[in-house]
Image (cartoon, rainbow, N blue to C red):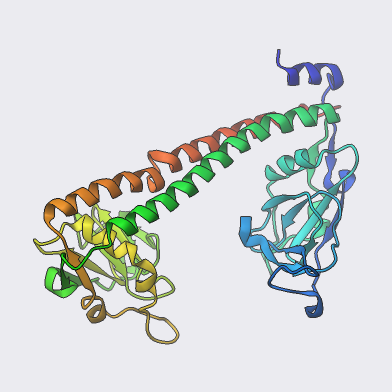
Amino acid sequence: MSKLDRLIAELCPDGVEYKTLVECCKLSAGGDVPKEHFSKKQTDEYNVPIYSNGIGDNAHYGWTNEARINKPCVTIAARGTIGYSALREKPFVPIIRLICAIPNDDIDVKYLKYAVEILSFQVPTSGIPQLTVPMVSKYKIPAPPLPVQREIVRILDNFTELTAELTAELTARKKQYDYYRNVLLTFGDDVERATLNEVGIMIRGTYITKKNTVQGNIPVILGGQEPAYYCDTSNHDGEAIVMSRSGAYAGFVSFWNQPIFVTDGFIIKPKEELKIKFLFYYLKNMQEALHQMKRGGGVPHVRGNEIMELIIPVPSLEEQERIVSILDRFDALTTDISSGLPAEIAARQKQYEYYRDKLLMFEEKGA
């Protein structure tokens, strides 16, 4: 019998009471921050963080000079990322897109965070999709005795700590990848150069609309970082470099080795002087510069003729193969969702969610 099982048998053998959030927390909605008390940068005076409804670092909105929440609490996104929760243990200021839940003395704040994670918040289908304090207050969570809560927290913290370590390793590996890609794709004067037009060809995508297609499993590339939808026909099969033509991600470079349908984009293929993966890695290494080549107001776009004037290094085919071999290993480690660190992180996350849901499922007292 585990320690948790012993605690449950000793402290709540007849089940656990379920309480509404308003019964076990003090709930409040965030507010506005006056302009005279707001700073985008942290200073000696403005050192209290302001949080909004974003996820992770995107939740940090700015800085102010006086905290509104001084106790550890759980924040719940009321708009946008509706229902997303975060643990806030230091003083801060919430703005209007957040609801704050400060637990009573009989609820551990970390336990509250885990319990809120599994709630499925529902919002009205009409008007602005948002949560309000009265809506949130009605949701129930199990409220076992504190020793049980803390043992659950200890178990789940071990899962989240492992995921955090893997995520930190992935971040470090990506930096290492970027470094070596820059080094490997920087060439001296002894390496020949040519325009992309001289060593490659560009094929413009075919116009298509979703309503004129039949749903299938072939990705449709429509200017974004991910396929816009899937259809049953393709206009290219095999290896290809694809560059998004217009929109916010104009200039985005991706590599494909399967049937695809490219519409608002360019297919770029090298001639015999270049290996296709070498050209892909070289273009990917200049991704920011490609984004900056966008032109036009409204819907920005990159121009094919300007892309084809890019200067491309042409090392020997043997050197290209060596570079591709190294970068392929880094790429698999940092981006492959079927192997490498992303796959391991996804597996750990699923494992965490399974045990979190199981640990927070109690027989209700008196049911």
Q: Where in the figure is residue 345, as x and y percent of width and height?
A: 50, 40
Asked whether 316 or 367 is in front, the reply is: 316
Q: Residue at x 82, y 51 (%)?
A: 101
Q: Residue at x 78, y 58 (%)?
A: 99
- Please count the marks in the image: 0
Is any part of residue 172 visible from this angle?
yes
Q: Where in the figure is residue 148, as x and y percent of width and height?
A: 80, 27
The N terminus: image quadrant: top right
Above-or-below relation of 224 to 341: below
Q: Residue at x 49, y 43 (%)?
A: 169
Asked whether 254 or 293 is in front, the reply is: 293
Above-or-below relation of 145 to 318: above
Q: Residue at x 80, y 21 (%)?
A: 8
Above-or-below relation of 165 to 73: above
Question: Residue 100, located in which quarter of the rendered image?
Answer: bottom right
Which residue occupies the extreme top position in the image?
1
Which residue occupies the extreme front position in the image?
189
Q: Where in the figure is residue 246, as x and y percent of width and height?
A: 36, 76
Q: Where in the figure is residue 361, as x and y percent of width and height?
A: 71, 31
Asked whether 110 or 206 is in front, the reply is: 110
The C terminus: image quadrant: top right
